[in-house]
Amino acid sequence: MEAADTGMRILVDADACPVKEEIKKVAGKTGVPVIMVSSYDHVLREEEGVRVVRVDRGKESADLYIANHLRAGDLVITQDYGLAALVLAKRAYALSERGIVYDSENIEFLLDRRHISAKVRRGGGKTKGPKKFTAEDRATFVEKCLKLLYELQEKL
């Protein structure tokens, strides 16, 4: 499918992203080009409609690249709440790998929860990690991503 000339792109925080293949399929259906941003430690290959950008191994390197290169109206796929907040501040859209649409209603709560958990861990306490990623999570992501992309394309 030929890429739609919408100007919108999907930028992916790809290092630990479990839905890279699903993103490619969704992008193919909607014609939105994809930019996968990953450290040199991960092997990703370019395909039609998918560009790969490699960054250094620094903890925040992929996030910084995305924050510095995204445009208003882009969609960013990330599990990082801090990056999601930056994306929203730049009038772009952010979606988690589990299909959660980050917005002004939920981002402060998510950032606060992350901060509290970090304080607990620094104090020697333990916090729960993320639930195991399931086939249902994968299906939810595809459904929410397609819905969001179609809605965004209608606005253009």
Image: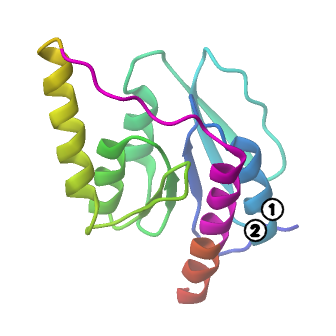
- Which residue is the extreme one toward the right? 1
Residue 33, by quadrant, is bottom right
Q: Amino acid at mark 1?
A: Gly
Is 118 on the left-hand or right-hand side of 49? left
Is 122 on the left-hand or right-hand side of 146? left
Which residue is drawn at the image coordinates 26% and 19% (left, top)?
126
Q: Nearer the viewer, residue 88 or 16?
A: 16
Evaluate if marks 2 and 1 touch, with contact meaning CB atoms under 8 Å apart: yes
Q: How far is disc 2 from disc 1 in space, using C-alphas?
A: 5 Å
Helix, strand, or loop for circle 2? loop
Which residue is drawn at the image coordinates 67% and 36% (left, top)?
52
Is 16 on the left-hand or right-hand side of 100? right
Provide the residue designation for mark 1.
Answer: 28
Q: Which residues are magenta?
A: 125-146
Vertical position of residue 40 compared to residue 45: above or below:
above
Residue 148 drawn at (x, y percent) = 57, 73
Q: Nearer the viewer, residue 109 or 72?
A: 109
Vertical position of residue 68 compared to residue 119: above or below:
below
Vertical position of residue 73 compared to residue 111: above or below:
below
Q: Amino acid at mark 2?
A: Gly
Provide the residue designation for mark 2.
Answer: 31
Helix, strand, or loop for circle 1? helix
Pointer 1 local density, CA inside 10 Å: few below 14, some 14–19, many at least 20: some
Residue 1 drawn at (x, y percent) = 88, 67
Q: Is residue 143 magenta?
A: yes
Pointer 2 local density, CA inside 10 Å: few below 14, some 14–19, many at least 20: many
Q: Is residue 66 magenta?
A: no
